[in-house]
Image (cartoon, grey):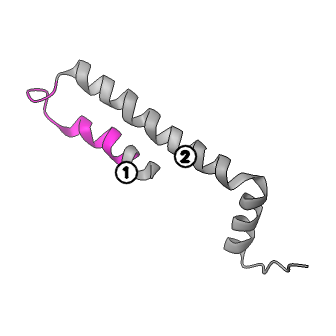
Amino acid sequence: MCIPFYILAFAQMAIPSEYLSLEIKGVLLFVLFGMAKTCQYGGLTIVGAEGYKRVKNWFRGKKETRV
């Protein structure tokens, strides 16, 4: 979910100034970048430390054994 917010945050800077003023672009950058960071850190919080270890091991190819 954070990737679309990052894309929107920086893609809106390509819109010419005749359509959006610099003040509005600054506000949009602030809001969209903040939403991206909120989604990113919210996802890390949900996954947690154990989930992070499982994902890291999965990418490395290690099989986790459950007891």
* x and y percentages locating residue 42 in the rendered image: 59, 44
Task: Please tell me whether residue 57 is drawn above or below residue 50 in the rendered image.
Answer: below
Identify the main secondary structure in magenta: helix
| Distance between the alpha carbons at the discs numbered 1 and 2 | 11 Å
Q: Report the side of 27 relative to 54 (left or right).
A: left
Mark 2 Cα within 10 Å, few/some/many (few <14, many 20+)?
Answer: some
What residue sits 75% from the left and 70% below the top?
A: 57
**Which image quarter holds the C terminus?**
bottom right
Mark 1 or 2, nearer chain start = 1
18 in the magenta segment: yes
Closer to the camera, 19 or 14?
A: 19
Q: Amino acid at mark 2?
A: Gln
The residue positioned 72% from the left and 52% from the top of the image is: 48
- Quarter of the image for residue 16 reads top left
Say which mark, if any, is on residue 51: none
Q: Give the image location of residue 21, x and y in percent.
A: 17, 22
Question: In the shown orientation, is residue 54 left or right of residue 7?
Answer: right
Pointer 1 with pointer 2, Cβ within 8 A: no
- Residue designated by label 1: 4
Q: Which residue carries the number 2 mark? A: 40
Give the residue at the far top of this rendering: 23
Q: Secondary structure at mark 2?
A: helix
Examine the structure image and report whether residue 16 is included in the region drawn in magenta. Answer: yes
Magenta residues, as a range? 6-20
> Mark 1 is on which residue type?
Pro
Q: Quadrant of residue 51?
A: bottom right
Residue appearing at x 85%, y 80% in the figure: 65
Q: Is residue 18 above or below residue 50?
A: above
Which element is circle 1 on? Answer: helix
Where does residue 44 sit, x and y in percent of width and height?
64, 49
**Mark 1 crowdedness (10 Å alpha carbons): few <14, some 14-19, many ≥20:** few
